[in-house]
């Protein structure tokens, strides 16, 4: 595809419900990242996938958050038992040169999650 | 150790003026310093980036100045235009092991007045 795509673009859910956010990276990109952007804040790293390696989950804020990447392409971020503090924009990025010095991460438009 | 501090939080500049945004970091293991530009409703897009072995990089109206000893770097936008109005984020990439993620500053909302 032309760029990173994410769906849904907006999601409103009730506290306690589970949500799934989807990311389609740029075709051929081996690295995929999830970030969270709270209102008026910078981006916070959540998780990183690189090829078939074990993902770097060091940024996940709690065990309610999980992510998977199927077939080295599409990724799904799942938030269980959502809380109001989970409300944020969830951004996905992909890159083709994670080990290169000048790696460019290409970001999708994000999913705006609102937990009521 | 992983923090990147960015200032100012907001900036208003007249058209044709120079916009300057500053960032400071603590972790000397960071090995790559990109700046991202974000328009409302869009994801961030890479604007310009620099490696720590270079003191300055210029691309068109955008320049990064990098001071390794002070652990500071800044973005200069020359001849600022209303179309430059956006939020700008500095970032730093971890240089160890699998620490490939970017650590972002808190962002600067730039408004260029016509």
Image (cartoon, coloured by chain):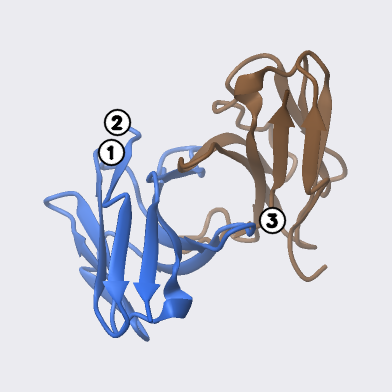
Q: CA distance from mark 1 to mark 2?
A: 5 Å
Q: Nearer the viewer, residue A2 or B86?
A: B86
Q: Callout 1: few (<14), some (14-19), or many (20+) C-alpha neighbours within 10 Å?
A: some
Based on the displayed image, in which of its 4 quarters is residue B103 positioned? top left
Chain A shade in the render: brown
Residue receiving disc 2: B1
Secondary structure found at label 1: loop
Secondary structure found at label 2: loop
Residue receiving disc 3: A109
What percent of the width, then of the height, locates residue B95? 40, 44
Q: Nearer the viewer, residue B81 or A4?
A: B81
The quadrant of the image that shows the N terminus of chain B is: top left
Above or below: residue A116 compared with residue B93: above
What percent of the width, then of the height, locates residue B102? 47, 46
Residue receiving disc 1: B27
Q: Residue at x 40, y 57 (%)?
A: B109
The quadrant of the image that shows the C terminus of chain B is: bottom left
Q: Residue at x 41, y 43 (%)?
A: B94
Above or below: residue A113 compared with residue B107: above
- Do the CB atoms of the residues marked 1 and 2 lie less than 8 Å apart? yes
């Amino acid at each position: 595809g032309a760029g990173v795509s994410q769906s849904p673009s907006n999601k409103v859910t009730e506290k306690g419900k589970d949500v799934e956010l989807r990311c389609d990276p740029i075709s051929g990109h081996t690295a995929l990242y999830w970030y969270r952007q709270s209102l008026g804040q910078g981006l916070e790293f959540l998780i990183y996938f690189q090829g078939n390696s074990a993902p770097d989950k060091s940024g996940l804020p709690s065990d309610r958050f999980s992510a998977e990447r199927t077939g080295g392409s599409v990724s799904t971020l799942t938030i269980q038992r959502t809380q109001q503090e989970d409300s944020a924009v969830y951004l996905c990025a992909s890159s083709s040169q994670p080990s290169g010095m000048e790696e460019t991460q290409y970001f999708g438009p994000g999913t705006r999650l609102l937990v009521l | 150790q992983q923090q990147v501090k960015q200032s100012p939080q907001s900036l208003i500049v007249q058209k044709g003026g120079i916009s300057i945004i500053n960032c400071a970091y603590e972790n000397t293991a960071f090995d790559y310093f990109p700046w991202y530009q974000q328009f409302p409703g869009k994801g961030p897009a890479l604007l310009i980036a620099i490696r720590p072995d270079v003191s300055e990089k210029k691309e068109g109206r955008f320049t990064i100045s990098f001071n390794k000893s002070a652990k500071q770097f800044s973005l200069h936008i020359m001849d600022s235009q209303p179309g430059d109005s956006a939020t700008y984020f500095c970032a730093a990439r971890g240089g160890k092991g699998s620490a490939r993620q970017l650590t972002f500053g808190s962002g600067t909302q730039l408004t260029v007045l016509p």
